[in-house]
Amino acid sequence: MKIPTELKHKPVIVSEDYDLIDGRSANASDAKGLSLGLAQWNDRGNLEISAKVWRHTGDKWSRQSEEMPLHRALDLAILICKSKLFFKERYHKHEKDYATYPLIERIGLQGGAMNVAICEENEHIQKDLDLFEACLQKDDEVISERLNVLYRLITELKQG
């Protein structure tokens, strides 16, 4: 499916037919494409690039399509990687009570830090940690494939 170009987000680089490879939703996803382009919130003379997930209901482009600045997409990738590392360590240590130590790590960014932590407000946190871990294990092949591609591309960037 072709990503629309007449809307406020102006796609420049696209990945169409994303629904065919969208993880466990492959071939049945409403996420029809990804794009990098000029952000819809741009003011004249103040341009930003954004990433966008394009969703389609079957009849029209969905209001649930999401647009985010590139740094936020990278922050999500960082969060995914740290989460996988956390659960890998949790598995190897056979420790299940991490909710008593909610801060996983402070990752330095822009002179500050992004806190990665267990959500203390979740009243079902122990059960949800186990469910989250089970989902990570179930989707390990899909996630790891993408992380391996990301690793290869980051290595290429560092060498260049």
Image (cartoon, rainbow, N blue to C red):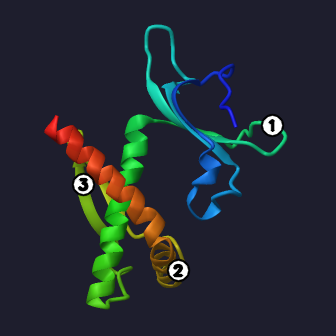
Q: Nearer the viewer, residue 96 or 83?
A: 83
The residue indicated by pointer 2 is 131
Amino acid on which disc 2 is placed? Leu
Circle nearer the N terminus (3, 2): 3
User: Which residue corresponds to the image point at 37% horizontal and 38% vertical from the top-left?
Assistant: 71
Circle nearer the N terminus (1, 3): 1
Q: Nearer the viewer, residue 101 or 76?
A: 76
The residue indicated by pointer 1 is 60
Up the image or down, 56 lies above or below 20; here it is above
**Horizontal relation, residue 15 to residue 148: left or right:** right
The residue indicated by pointer 3 is 107
Up the image or down, 54 lies above or below 94; here it is above
Which tag is nearer the camera, tag 1 or tag 2? 1
Mark 1 lies on a secondary structure that is loop
Kindly indicate the quadrant of the structure image that contains residue 70: top left
Kindly give the residue lying farthest to the bottom in the view shown: 94
Which tag is nearer the camera, tag 3 or tag 2? 2
Q: Nearer the viewer, residue 69 or 121?
A: 69
Up the image or down, 92 lies above or below 157; here it is below
Report the Cα–Cα distance between label 1 and label 2: 34 Å
Q: Position of residue 146 (x, y in %)?
A: 41, 56
Amino acid on which disc 3 is placed? Ile
Badge 2 local density, few (<14 within 10 Å), some, or many (20+)? few
Q: Quadrant of the N terminus?
A: top right
